[in-house]
């Protein structure tokens, strides 16, 4: 009988594969991930201003690499 684990670290330790669930507890920390630029709370009073605020947020997410850029 063989056993294949969903989560494993490849030989040499350069790559860890998570095929199951990765649970990060409240007291845990993750290092190596940078924070994205702050997006201040919207004070928009028109739909046009709200769209501008939303697009600014999308831009920050894309710049941080947390969202795929638009394709032409």
Image: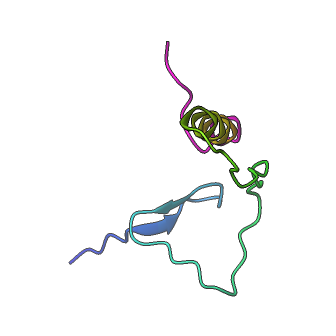
Q: Residue at x 67, y 36 (%)?
A: 56
Q: Residue at x 60, y 45 (%)?
A: 66
Looking at this view, is 60 or 30 the one in front? Answer: 60
Q: Residue furthest front?
A: 45
Q: Is residue 15 left or right of residue 32?
A: left
Looking at this view, is 31 or 72 the one in front? Answer: 72
Q: Is residue 10 above or below residue 51?
A: below
Quadrant in which the N terminus is drawn: bottom left
Magenta span: predominant SS is: loop
Q: Is residue 20 above or below residue 51?
A: below
Q: Is residue 69 left or right of residue 27?
A: left
Q: Residue furthest bottom?
A: 27
Looking at this view, is 58 or 71 the one in front? Answer: 58
Q: Is residue 64 above or below residue 52?
A: below
Q: Position of residue 38 (x, y in %)?
A: 78, 52
Q: Is residue 37 left or right of residue 12?
A: right
Is 27 covered by the magenta stretch? no
Is 71 covered by the magenta stretch? yes
Q: Identify the magenta region.
A: 61-72
Q: What is the number of callouts on the image?
A: 0
Q: Position of residue 61 (x, y in %)?
A: 64, 42
Q: Residue furthest left?
A: 1
Q: Residue at x 66, y 34 (%)?
A: 59
Q: Position of residue 36 (x, y in %)?
A: 75, 50
Coloring applied to the structure: rainbow
Q: Quadrant of residue 6?
A: bottom left
Q: Position of residue 41 (x, y in %)?
A: 71, 55
């Amino acid at each position: 009988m063989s056993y294949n684990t969903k989560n494993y670290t490849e030989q040499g330790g350069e790559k860890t594969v998570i095929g199951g669930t990765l649970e990060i507890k409240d007291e845990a920390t993750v290092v190596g991930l940078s924070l994205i630029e702050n997006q201040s709370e919207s004070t928009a009073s028109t739909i046009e201003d709200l769209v501008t605020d939303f697009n600014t947020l999308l831009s920050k997410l894309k710049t941080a690499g947390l969202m795929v850029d638009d394709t032409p």
